[in-house]
Image (cartoon, helix red, strand yellow):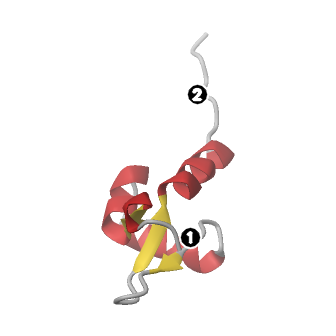
Amino acid sequence: MNKLTEYLYTAAAAEYLGVAQNTIRKWAGLGDIPMHRNPANGYRLFKRADLDKFLKRVARPAKTPK
């Protein structure tokens, strides 16, 4: 496992993506976002780089008004 500083806990990952914590848990359960576990306590961890990849994958260009 990499340095734990490269990871965010569920609450921080939810804030980073602008969604609820349950949404992060759901996406992780579905495999949409890779999830890791803290080896010391088993908490969910999300790698910042994985969250950025997820954002790029689901990003949609904004519609420009005519």
| Rendering coords of residue 37 (x, y %) | 47, 82
**Left or right: residue 36 compared with residue 3:** right
What residue is drawn where x is 37% and y is 70%?
10
Residue 44: percent from left, percent from top: 43, 78
Front disc: 2 or 1: 1
Q: Is residue 44 left or right of residue 61?
A: left
**Residue found at x 59% / y 17%:** 64
Query: Neighbour class for label 1 at 10 Å: few (<14), some, many (≥20)?
Result: few
Q: Nearer the viewer, residue 16 or 21?
A: 16
Determine the CA span between mark 2 and mark 1. Answer: 23 Å
Q: Is residue 18 above or below residue 36?
A: above
Looking at the image, tell me whether mark 2 or mark 1 is earlier in sequence order: 1
Name the amino acid, label 2.
Ala
Reading the image, the residue beneath label 2 is 62
Q: Is residue 17 above or below residue 41?
A: above
Picture residue at 33% right of the left edge, 55% below the top: 15
Going 44% across and 65% down the picture, which residue do you hit?
Answer: 3
**Type of the residue with mark 1:** Trp
Disc ID at residue 27: 1
Vertical placement of 6 versus 25: above or below? Answer: above
Kind of element beneath mark 2: loop
Between 5 and 10, the one lying in front of the other is 5
